[in-house]
């Protein structure tokens, strides 16, 4: 969890207010729900300010840049940190 390669184009990220915030694509909502579960949130599939704050806290706890965005680096780290399911 998340599984597979990073689903966005190089340089893109899941972020609050961005084009991949869950409002335009069912595929984005699917991945955002997985991200939200990973950071301990109720999964609604929309990347708003609460998701950004929880992601930033998760990133900080894992020694990553705590910017609240899920790009390829955060995605890869989420894949390697066990949370009980993949």
Image: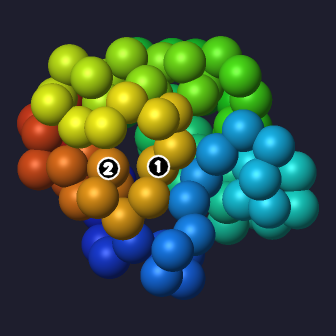
Residue 25: x and y, percent?
A: 81, 64
Q: Residues within 10 Å of mark 2 (few under 14, many from 20)?
A: many
Tell me if 60 is positioned left or right of 28 in this view.
left
Tell me whether the residue at label 1 lies in contact with that at label 2, contact meaning CB atoms closer than 8 angstroms.
yes
At 32% from the left and 50% from the top, the residue drawn is: 74
- The mark found on residue 74 in the picture is 2
Residue 58: x and y, percent?
A: 32, 23
At 20% from the left and 49% from the top, the residue drawn is: 77
Give the total number of marks visible in the rendering: 2
On screen, 36 above or below 6? above
Give the camera-side residue of 50 and 30. 50
On screen, 67 above or below 72? above
Tell me if 63 is positioned left or right of 54 in this view.
left
Which residue extends farthest bottom? 9
Residue 28: x and y, percent?
A: 67, 60
The residue to which callout 1 is attached is 70
Give the camera-side residue of 15 and 38. 15
The local secondary structure at tag 2 comes to: helix
């Amino acid at each position: 969890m998340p599984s597979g390669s990073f689903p966005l184009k190089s340089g893109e990220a899941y972020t609050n207010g961005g084009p991949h915030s869950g409002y335009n694509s069912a595929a984005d909502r699917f991945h955002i729900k997985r991200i939200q579960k990973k950071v301990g949130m109720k999964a609604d599939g929309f990347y708003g300010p609460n998701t950004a704050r929880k992601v930033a806290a998760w990133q900080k706890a894992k020694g990553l840049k705590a910017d609240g965005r899920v790009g390829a680096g955060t995605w890869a780290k989420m894949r390697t940190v066990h949370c009980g399911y993949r």
